[in-house]
Image (spheres, rainbow, N blue to C red):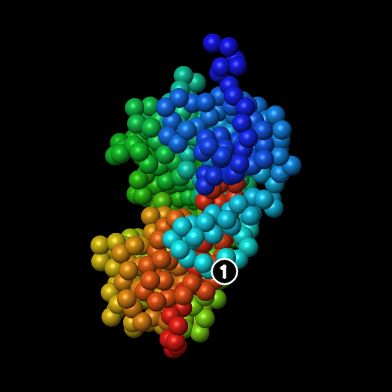
Amino acid sequence: MSEATMTTTCEIARLGLRGDGVTADGVVVPGALPGETVRVAPEEGTRPPRARLDAVLTPSSDRIAPFCPYFGTCGGCAVQHLAPAPYAAWKRDLVVGALARVGIEAPVGPLLDAHGTGRRRITLHVRASDGGPQAGFMAARSHALVPIDHCPVTEAALHRAPEIARRVSRPLGGGGGKPLDVQVTATAGGLDVDIRGHGPASDRARQALVLIAGELDLARLSLHGEVLIVRRPPEIPAGRSRLVPPSGGFLQATQEGETTLARLVVEGVGKAKRVVDLFSGAGAFSLALAEGHTVHAVEGEDGALKALDRAFRETGGLRTVTTERRDLFRRPLLAPELDRYDAVVFDPPRAGAEAQSARIAESKVPVVVGVSCDAGSFARDAALLVRGGYRLETVTPVDQFRHSPHVEIVGVFKRPGKKR
C-alpha cells in the first residue's frame, strides 16, 4: 500500500470537548488545532471516526511547544500545545456550550487560573517489567504504561513520586501478578502515600513497607486506606484550620484551586446564617464557611466527617459545624429538611447530583451554590434547579486541571423573591 493511500490531508475546524482537533466532517485528530492543515492516517473502525496526526502542514498561530517530554504519549494532558489565551477561551466555552445544550443562558465569567504551584496529588500505575517495577501513566485510550521520571504539572514535592511508587511496590511484588496504583499527596507534613490494587498483604510485606516509609521520609503510608504508619500528620491547610484527610480521601486537585473555590462558595452564600454543605467531603468548604456561618455538613464517608469534626474542634473562633453521615444518592435531603437553611452548597462527584438537585429544586431555600468538576453534569443539575424556579445568576469556571479538558465550575442560583 502506498503512502498516498495510507494518509490523507484535511483541515481542522474546531477543538473538541476532549481537547482534540475535529474536522468539519467530525473526524477526531488528537494533537491538531483549529485552522491547521494536517496530514493524518485514518484509524479503522473507530466511533467517532479518528485519525492519527502524521504531520502539521500549516500550523496554527496559536500552536506553542509543549513543555513535557511525555506529552502526546502519556494520556494525561491534552492541550499543552495551545497558547494561553485561546486555551482559556476554549475552557470557558466548554461551560457555555454545556449550559446551551440544556437551554440555559447565564453569565459565564472568564476562566480563573487556579493551578498555583501545581497538582498536589498524583496517582501512578505500577507494572512489572524485566528491569524491575515501572511507574507512570497510561497512554491515551490504552492500557499501555508510559513510565515517567516525574510529572512537571505537579508540585515540586511530587517530582520523586515515581521513584517512591517503585520502591513501595517491591514488597508487594513490584506490580507483578496484581498491578498497583500508588497515590501520592503533597501535604504540609510531607508526602502521604496510599497503595491500591494488591489486596491483603503479609506481615512481612507490611513490616518492609513501614521500613521503606522511614527510608523515604514519608508522612503517612497506607494500604487500601488502612494506615500502616504515621510519622507526621499529613495536614492540609483549610482556611485557618489544619485538616488531616483520610487516606486516599478526596481532595481538590491544587491548593490554589481549593482556596479559590472556597472563596467563591463563601461569596456565593452571602449573608446566609445557616448553611448546609452537601457532599462535604472532609470539609474544606465547611471550615471556610464556619468563619461566619453556622454549617451542617452532610457526607457519605465516615472517615471524611471524622476528619472534618477533628479539624473544627481544633480550630478556635469558628461558628458551629455539625455533621451527618448520609448517602445523598440514595437518600437525598428532602425539601422540608432543606427549608431549615438559608443557603445550600453542593459539590458532588463527577457524575453530579441528579436526585439531590431535584429535591433542592422543590425547596424554598433562597440561595444555592453548586460546585462541579464536570460541565455536563453541572448543566444537567442546573437545568433541574432552573425548572424548579431558580435563576442561575453567576457562573465561574476555575482552572485547577491545567492542560486537561476538565474544568471546575461554581454556579450561584437564587430563587426570585426569597430573602432571609
Between 274 and 390, the one nearer to me in the picture: 390
Q: In the rendering, at what x and y percent does residue 67 appear?
A: 68, 39
Q: In percent of the image, x 37 and y 67: which residue is there?
A: 384
Choose top left, top right, bottom left or bottom right for residue 281: bottom left
The quadrant of the picture occupied by the N terminus is: top right
Q: In the rendering, at what x and y percent does residue 133 appear?
A: 46, 28
> Taking 23 as reference, is 290 left or right?
left
Please, is residue 88 above or below residue 294 in the view?
Answer: above
Query: What kind of residue is marked 1?
Result: Pro
Secondary structure beneath dot 1 equals: loop
Please, is residue 251 above or below residue 126 in the view?
Answer: below
Q: Residue furthest right?
A: 61
Q: Residue furthest front?
A: 25
Q: In the rendering, at what x and y percent does residue 76 appear?
A: 53, 40
Please, is residue 32 above or below residue 52 in the view?
Answer: below
Q: In the rendering, at what x and y percent does residue 16 appear?
A: 54, 44
> Taking 202 as reference, is 54 left or right?
right
Q: In percent of the image, x 64 and y 42: which residue is there?
A: 34
Q: Residue furthest top?
A: 1
Q: In percent of the image, x 30 and y 64: which residue is there?
A: 355
Q: Residue furthest bottom?
A: 420
Between 95 and 8, the one nearer to me in the picture: 8
Q: In percent of the image, x 71 and y 39: which residue is there?
A: 60
The answer to whether any part of residue 124 appears in the image is yes
Choose top left, top right, bottom left or bottom right for residue 399: bottom right
Between 359 and 174, the one nearer to me in the picture: 359
> Taking 148 as reference, is 224 left or right?
left
For label 1, the residue is: 107
Tell me the crowding category of disc 1: few under 14, some 14 to 19, or many 20 or more residues within 10 angstroms, Cα based: few
The quadrant of the picture occupied by the C terminus is: bottom left
The answer to whether any part of residue 262 appears in the image is no
